[in-house]
Amino acid sequence: MTRQRPLALHFDARVLDHDTGSALHETTPSPWFSVNEPHTEGRLRIERMHDLLSRGPAADAIRFAPGRLASEEELARVHDAEYIAEVRRATERGGGWVTGTTRLGADSYVPLLAAAGTALAAAETVLSGAAPFAYALTRPPGHHAQRAQADGYCFFNGVALAADAARQAGADRVLVIDWDVHHGNGTQDIFYERDDVLTVSLHMDHGAWGASHPQTGRLEERGAGPGAGFNQNVPLPLGAGNAGYLRAFDEVIAPLAERFQPDMIVCASGQDASAYDPNGRHNVSMPGFYGIGARVRELAERHTDGRAILVQEGGYNPSYAPYCLLATVEGLLGLDATPDPLAYVPDQTLGLDDLFAEIRDLSALPGGPGAAAWPRRFRRTRLWWVTAACAEAEADVRCEKNTEHTVQCSCGSGRGIKEEPMGAAPRDTPGNDALGRRVASFRQLRGMSLRTLAAAAGVSSSFLSQLENGHTNASVASLRKVAAALGVAPAQLLDDSAAHTRGVLRAADRPTLPLAGAQKHVVALPPLGNLEIYAGRFPPGGSTGAEAYTHGNSQEFIVVTEGRVVLELDGTRYELDTDDSIEFLSSVPHRVVNESDTPAAILWINSPPTPDEAPHSSTPDDTRTTQQRRNLA
């Protein structure tokens, strides 16, 4: 039986013809050397990578595929047309130094088109379903190439082209993850004002480096206009190593992906963060790159039906970078890890706790400022929908698919239930910001790392990270484990969590948003609890009222079943067409308006937390919680 090869590796030998000449490492040759070495961005590094992947231990899991030339029309989707023309004219003039480190050869234009086209070919392979993973092994790198500026050896941005191709193919949201040791400033520049591409860059904290690279890569660069909050930089201290990069995946990227719900993942895969790279020295070794690959696979399995596109970026030690790429591929495919033949330098973790705490405080991570105003959109094709057919209305409900469950409509006039699988349902539950902040505060007060607390409590680091970020509720058992590990009573974690008390313990009495003429239905989804559903119609110009509502602390879902409406959410407008859906917190000011000239209909679904998630304790603190409940009644 032929073994399935899940990774398509796209390679076009024409990329090797990009001649960067001789250099003093990366800049103009020294006049005092009798012989200068080749520019560090040369063909040998890619040739060695190709050798190791085609002859090494992962060869049986890789299918080699061709690249192609990108057209100038394709390049113009992410680059200015005049910039593209100027790159072509520069090669026709014989090439030369474009920046202090970036050199163009006389015959470089076709190799540059091959590099961009190979990234597009990899994207097309995944988007067509021919393979779940595709890797564009290409050069020169591209993630520094801005819309109209070459920089850092880069001319055309392959990662941006792949992300744009995914959008053109129907992916509503694309997550770009860049672990090259340098800031992905070009990709940031291209998508900086867009909310359909979330860009995350892990890099050394090198700052701006001149006119060709004005971006700093620091936390304050978070996007602009519609893209505000959709660019996340993670500037790591020098030498952060495996610990820093894997914590960034666990504590930043994974929670952001949960909120963003990407339809495709595109990765800028560089190996220059290794301990032996002349451009990096960031201490990441083969086990670290294996962990990066494994985390990309886990993110893909959770969010994008197991699919991801990877594009080669940096990695300039021709001996060690190929081994780091091998480790990345082994982690991505779940293969046995090849032993590291070289690395021994320990990670430098000083400052990591402060960095990740600052990112959590400043970013739109779940639980951070602005998180509630960053709604989550869903596609029907990625959910399990249960249809409750009633005499008054037909209600589509987002729910988990369990092995054994029943769905009942309690409106008294039900005609039956129809279930239709539409893909894997998200595995998350409504979160609680105050509880998460309380856990994080106690942990930091005790000087415990996330991993230390997780190990002491017997829970996973991923669960604890999501809990602190307000993304998931703790079960009673888990809450007790975390409290015991922190040396506090469970109720102490809830003392300043009035919103949690209201949301969990008073779910039945929580106020709901009235819709004029709406029919209310309650659908029971054991063991998930009851979902309150309002089916409402809006005439042209109709709305939920002149003023925005705020109420409770539950999750709200709006599903447009007919026409088009506008959701005004904390001052931001979201246009929703038929079959669009959106999730947000009820505590955020919100209002629905039909601005079209035709009627519209929506389902408004209120999703309270499940009753068995209600924390309880025999300590005196539980009495105060009970009093809080009475005050809320």
Image: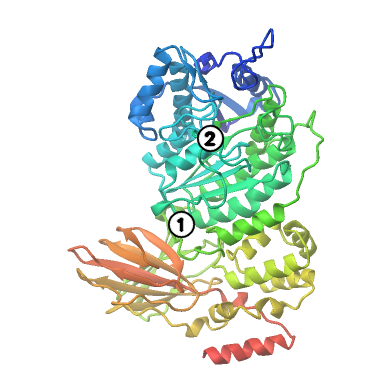
Q: Residue at x 66, y 19 (%)?
A: 48
Q: Which mark is residue 210?
A: 2
Q: Amino acid at mark 2?
A: Gly
* Res 1 seen here: no
Question: Which quarter of the image is occupied by the N terminus?
Answer: top right
Q: Residues within 10 Å of mark 2 (few under 14, many from 20)?
A: few
Gap between marks 2 and 1 measured at Cα = 47 Å
Above or below: residue 389 compared with residue 498: above
User: Residue 528: which quarter of the image?
Assistant: bottom right
Q: How many marks?
A: 2
Residue toward you, 184 or 286 = 184
User: Residue 626: which quarter of the image?
Assistant: bottom right
Q: Which mark is residue 581?
A: none
Q: Earlier in the sequence, mark 2 or mark 1?
A: 2
Residue toward you, 261 or 401 = 261
Q: Position of residue 554 (x, y in %)?
A: 49, 73
Q: Is residue 125 left or right of residue 81?
A: right
Q: Is residue 416 left or right of residue 524?
A: left
Q: Which mark is residue 383?
A: 1
Above or below: residue 490 compared with residue 21: below
* Res 363 seen here: yes
The secondary structure type at the circle numbered 2 is loop
The secondary structure type at the circle numbered 1 is strand
* Badge nearest the viewer, 2 or 1: 2
Q: Residue at x 59, y 42 (%)?
A: 207
Residue at far front of view: 32
Q: Residue at x 68, y 76 (%)?
A: 493
Q: Position of residue 209 (x, y in %)?
A: 56, 36
Q: Residue at x 32, y 59 (%)?
A: 576
Q: Amino acid at mark 1?
A: Leu
